Amino acid sequence: MKKLFAVAALALCLFASTAMGADKTYTISINQIVEHPSLDATRFGFMDRLKELGIDAKYNVHIAQGNMATNTQIASQIAGEKPDLVLGISTPSAQAVAQKIKDHPILFACVTDPVAAGIVNSLEKPGANVSGMTDMSPMDKHFELIREIVPGIKSIGVIYNAGEANSVVLIDLLKKYASAAGVNVEEATIANSAGVYQAAKSLVGRCEAIYIPVDNTVVSALESAIKVCRQNHLPLISGDTDSVARGTIAALAVDYREMGVQTADMALRVLQGADTATMPVENLKHLRLHVNLKAAGSMGVTLPESVVSRAEKVIR
């Protein structure tokens, strides 16, 4: 059976290569707000999958290093590159290219709420030249995971960049679920990655656990928050699984490499002539639970067996 699947996959790749024209080299420009494992995994998954599909592509990869002004400049630069396809990885990156580029197809990935961010008109019918993939976090499940790890918790601390539209959406959802359960949410907002350490310190004594959403600014300086949580035996839970390997104690989230792969499948359809205006925004249905027992121990936490037993990946 596995051999049959392998043959079928190879046939698909050969068909795609023939259909697209094996001698054509496509120009794909990528705008990514910052380098961190989740966004990088999406980019590499995207590029690797297109190679599997037989697409010969030249990539112009631009990283804004968390600077919003640079992010906007990159969008203008990409417009001048006249690419066959543009990929915006993260909400700020997708917003920038969608605002600046109207005559080339755009796909986005790692965008929490593309409608609220003003990137598309609706998930079903995006409109214009933009479509892509959302990584909307299941905040109800994240909240329940926090309560399972810290039974009886009364106050959750959060660190986020209030300038990132995706983070605001996530924190509003967290506050909604927390309020219904009688749990307080203590906020510490930052403007750049340099503020993460002080933001984490400001939450010490005000909460029983810290949660970091899928916030590009905070995740790029995650080690600062980890240091504070280790020093104060404060559990740190993240919104993305890549952060667990770096030192948070648990996360329930999508696989960002898989997101890149699925976005590449969308890209193939676009390069074949599909209209982004009528291409529905997609998401990943499968969630992965990762836990880090070593990190938990360093933060004075014993993870419940109910959490460890159902984790797809356990770091010891």
Image (cartoon, rainbow, N blue to C red):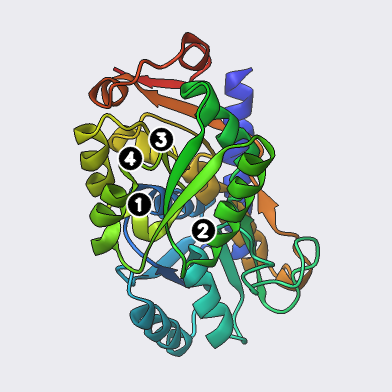
| Residue for badge 4 | 205
| Residue for badge 2 | 167
> Is 154 situated above or below 302?
below
Q: Which mark is residue 219?
A: 1
Tell me the kind of residue under disc 4: Gly
Residue mark closest to the camera, 2 vs 1: 2
Tell me the kind of residue under disc 1: Val
Q: Quadrant of residue 287?
A: top right
Q: Are marks 4 and 3 in contact (CB under 8 Å)?
A: no
| Residue nearest the observer in this picture, 23 or 66 | 66
Tell me the kind of residue under disc 2: Ser
Q: Which mark is residue 209?
A: 3
The mark that comes first in sequence, 1 or 4, is 4
Tell me the kind of residue under disc 3: Ala
Q: Position of residue 96 (x, y in %)?
A: 50, 79
> Distance of mark 2 from mark 3, alpha carbons?
18 Å
Label 3 sits on a secondary structure element that is strand
